[in-house]
Amino acid sequence: MKYAAALIEYLITGIISLIWIGLYSRQYVEISAENIKAYKEVIVICVFPIAYVFGIYVDVSSSYLLKRFSNIAEFISKRFSCPRWLKWLLNLLVGTSKSEPYKRSAEILSYSPSDTIKTMEAYISRDRIARGMALNSFACGLISHLTFTGDTQHIAVNLSVTIFIISIFAWFRLRRLSKAFKTQALIQLTKREQKN
C-alpha cells in the first residue's frame, strides 16, 4: 500500500509537471495534434515512466525549496516583528492546528498501530501532492510568461499564480494538520504501550 500510494503521488505530480515541460519544449520541438496522433502509442508507453521520474524530481525540489523558504521566514520573524494585522490575516487564511479533534481519532486508532501508520501516510501523501502542485503551478506561470503573449499569457499566468497561492496555503494547512495528528497519535500510542 505504501509503495502504491507513493507511485500514485509521483505520477500525479509528474503528469502535472508535463504541462509546463511541454510548454517549454514547444519552443524547440514541434508539438502538434498530427504528431501526437502519429506517435500516440509511443507517447502512452513513455509518459508514465517519465511522469514518475519528473514527479520524484518535483517532490524533492519542492520539499527542498519550501524548507529553505521556511528557514528564511523563521530567520526574518526572529529579526523583525510581524505586524499584528499580518499575523491575524495569516491565522485567518492558514488557521491553527488544534490537536483536540485528533485526540479522539488518535485514541481510537491507537488500538491498531498499523491503521495509525496508514493514517499518517495519508496525511503525508496530501502534503506531498500540495507542495508538488505549488512548484508545478509556479513553473507553469513562469513558462507561460516566457512562452505566451497577449491575453493567453495573462490568463495562464494569473491562473498559475492563483493555483500557486492556493497550493501554498493548502500545504501550510495540511502540514499543520498532519503534525497535530502525528503528535496526538504518538501520545496515544505511548499511553497504550505503557498500559500494556
Image: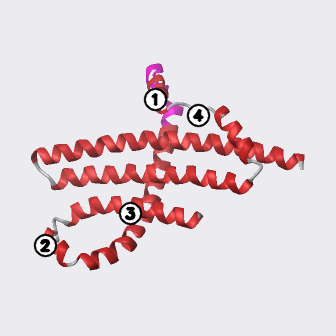
- Residue matched to label 3: 14
Q: CA distance from mark 4 to mark 3?
A: 30 Å
Seen at 41% across and 60% down, the residue is 12
**CA distance separating discs 3 and 1:** 30 Å
Question: What residue span does the magenta drawing correspond to?
Answer: 75-86
Q: Dot 4 corresponds to which residue?
A: 97
- State the CA–CA distance, disc 2 to disc 4: 51 Å
* Count of labels in the image: 4
Return the x and y of residue 164 as percentages of the image width and height: 35, 44
Colour basis: secondary structure
Do labels 4 and 3 touch, CB within 8 Å?
no
According to the image, label 1 marks what residue? Answer: 90
**Left or right of 179 in this view: 174:** left
| Tag 2 residue | 34
Q: In the image, which is nearer the foreground, mark 3 or mark 2?
A: 2
The answer to which of marks 2 and 4 sits earlier in the sequence is: 2
In percent of width and height, residue 166 lies at 38, 40
Cα distance in 3D space between marks 1 and 4: 13 Å
Label at residue 57: none
Q: Is residue 65 magenta?
A: no
Q: Nearer the viewer, mark 2 or mark 1?
A: 2
| Residue 33 position (above or below residue 174) | below
Is 109 situated left or right of 32 in this image? right
In the figure, 129 relative to 25: above or below?
above
Q: Residues within 10 Å of mark 4 (few under 14, many from 20)?
A: some
